[in-house]
Image (tube, rainbow, N blue to C red):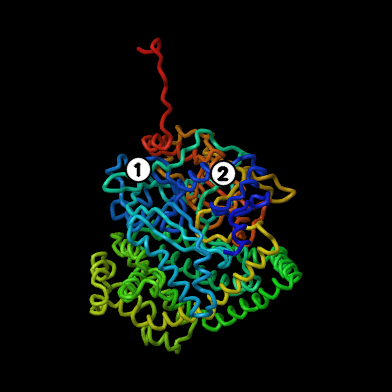
Amino acid sequence: MRSWLFVLCLLPSLSFAAEGMWTFDALPTAAIESSLGVKLTPEWVTRVQHGAARLSSGCSASFVSEKGLVLTNHHCVRGCISQLSKPGRDLLGLGFTARRPAQELECPALHVQQLTGMEDVTAKVEKAVEGKKGKARADAMRALKASLEAPCSEKPEQRCEVVSFFGGGRHVLYTYRRYTTVKLVWAPEFPTAAWGGYADNFHFPRFGLDAALLRVWENGKPATTPQALGIAREPLKAGDPSFVAGHPGGTERQVTMAQLTWQRDVVLPSTLIELAELRGLLLAHRATTRGDKTVVDARLRSIENGLKALSGRHKALGDPSFFAKLVEEEQRLRREVGKNPAQAQKVKGAWEEIEEALTTYASFRDEHRLFALAQAFPGELFGHARDLMRAAVEKDKPDGLRLEGYTQAELPALQARLGSTAPVRADLEALQLGFGLRRMRELLGADHPLVQRVLGREDPEAMAERLVKTTRLDRHQTRLALFSGGMSAVAKSDDPMLLLAAEIEMEARTLAARYREEVETPIRAASQRIAEARFAVDGTNGYPDANFTLRLSYGRVEGWTEAADREPVAPLTTFGQALDRATGTAPYALAPSWIRARSRIRRETPFNVSSSHDIIGGNSGSPLLNANGEVAGLVFDGNLHSLGGRYGYDVPKNRAVSVHMDAILESLRTIYRASHLADELVPPVAVKVTAEESP
């Protein structure tokens, strides 16, 4: 292994800023102690690592009782709640509380994972790809990755994943303990969790109870989870040091200006147009549908959240001063690298190679994302069809030659998704698929060979209606039978959704291979050389871009000052402020449960909290920890200034937003009649009675 890389992974950073999403094997402990006055012991780090969790829904979570209780956001399990709802049981709109374990409801296809081990495999990767380029390099990397992950497939409760950091400069094998039986225990009403709606999203003050409780089960009973984090008995207050342990999904702070320009000028504008159009379709559908509007509202919430988040990113990259800082940082790096002839020679042409790869991608981007990424075919049903077809093909191949997502280690999770008993909402499936097909025709043109092959002379919306109406893949029994039957069963099937997936599969694979060879592989190789140059210049003052691995962020409970002529934003809100804010109409209407309990609610209870933590999407559901490593809050959002956090951290104004733990406990006890859950989270302190005091 390169000596500089080894040093990077072991030494703490000298940075004193709250910026950073730090991996647990390279925490800047000295900087944390200097900045916050908190010394992180190895025991503290291990306990927090094992107490943190991540969800297969793309969110974070934490174990909060030794009986398998898991705390996360409501919006992270909204899919499960929708799936468990049915006519006469609107769990999304009315909320849910299990009074005892027997009443808990299993979430279809939701898994909870706990990080148990990290092994540096950089040397193995470098040996496997040494001297290889293009397709040969990509194939060698895929084969090694599969071989390293394969042992986990022998144990259903394990999952392994080879993760790359620093543009491919470091590779680590992550091992997870996987809980596959996950049940819903408590969730407030959707309007309460998302209180304030689109208007309040990414704003502060905030008043959202975006929280939910799950429980992991094993062998037909609640799992024993001694790794659970304790709940803070002392509430967080302004100025307190605090930490966030979660799984940030992705940042682009170490990419080149060519890549950021590509995001600003190509990716973000086109995505925003599509999201805005889909939002309009959903709003129109909501106005006319006679079905459950809560499910549509939840889908709308996701689309609107994406719109606001991506708009914020685009605004950040469009800000001349913000972008100029990023340009200057790259120019500084290139100047410093140029001072060392040997290093300059190693990195020569790397920035240009990335730009050339993106130029190449521009020539086939629409075809790639529409077909290889299936953006022309949105929805669950086509996803099931593609998974069934690919699983049938890939299962007969050696593990190292399979497509990503279909290795032996990944098949159990795939089978669980296919076996989900959750109902498929046919009207939303048809709406989304029709939108995707029409968008395909608009982008490529009606005469494009692939458009002709898919649509022929058929109308996009009519084709979507026909496919959704006639497919049998909405039935989990059908999906599982096809999965078990393999190639023989899939080849014999005349299901129209499967036939569509088969019709475009060759082109989809060809486009995916072209992307790997002409775009992904050269960008990764060039990025690795740039990363090496950055380390040579900047030493150990760095952390890797987020990639949905466990990270620790440190900071304090604090607000911010929006402008010199405005009052500072206070870091805490209260239940009383929320009650005063209620108007009786959406999105500020109180749920019936809150109206009934209004006179009993303690108005001074802290509700939401702002803190200076460096987070990004994927951190939703992360525990907000106090200095003792106890859960004192639950991350669910950021402020508007956090939206540019994908590209850089704004120290004065970027803030994370969490549900205060006192708000969750007060809600359970006072509003939802769930004191048994509050007591499981915070067991009552035993009162010692003396003989003289005994009755």
Residue 105 versus residue 424: which sits nearer the camera?
105
Classed neighbour count for the residue bearing mark 2: other residues with Cα under 10 Å, few (<14), some (14–19), many (≥20):
many
Amino acid at the residue labelled 1: Thr
**Can you give x and y, in whole percent of width and height, for residue 52 in the image?**
46, 48
Q: Could you tell me which secondary element the residue under label 2 belongs to?
A: strand
Classed neighbour count for the residue bearing mark 1: other residues with Cα under 10 Å, few (<14), some (14–19), many (≥20):
some
Where is 212 relative to 533, above or below?
Answer: above
The residue singled out by tag 2 in the image is 609
Q: CA distance from mark 1 to mark 2?
A: 31 Å
> Would residue 458 be seen by someone viewing this image from the given angle?
yes
The residue singled out by tag 1 in the image is 224
**Can you give x and y, in whole percent of width and height, for residue 479 in the image?**
27, 68
In contact (CB < 8 Å): disc 1 and disc 2: no
Residue at image coords 35%, 78%: 501
**Can you give x and y, in whole percent of width and height, for residue 309 in the image?**
55, 61
Residue at image coords 62%, 70%: 260
| Among the 4 quarters of the image, the one containing residue 384 | bottom left
**Can you give x and y, in whole percent of width and height, for residue 97 in the image?**
35, 43
Where is 139 relative to 197, above or below?
Answer: below
Q: Could you tell me which secondary element the residue under label 1 belongs to?
A: loop
Asked if residue 45 lies left or right of residue 457, the reply is right
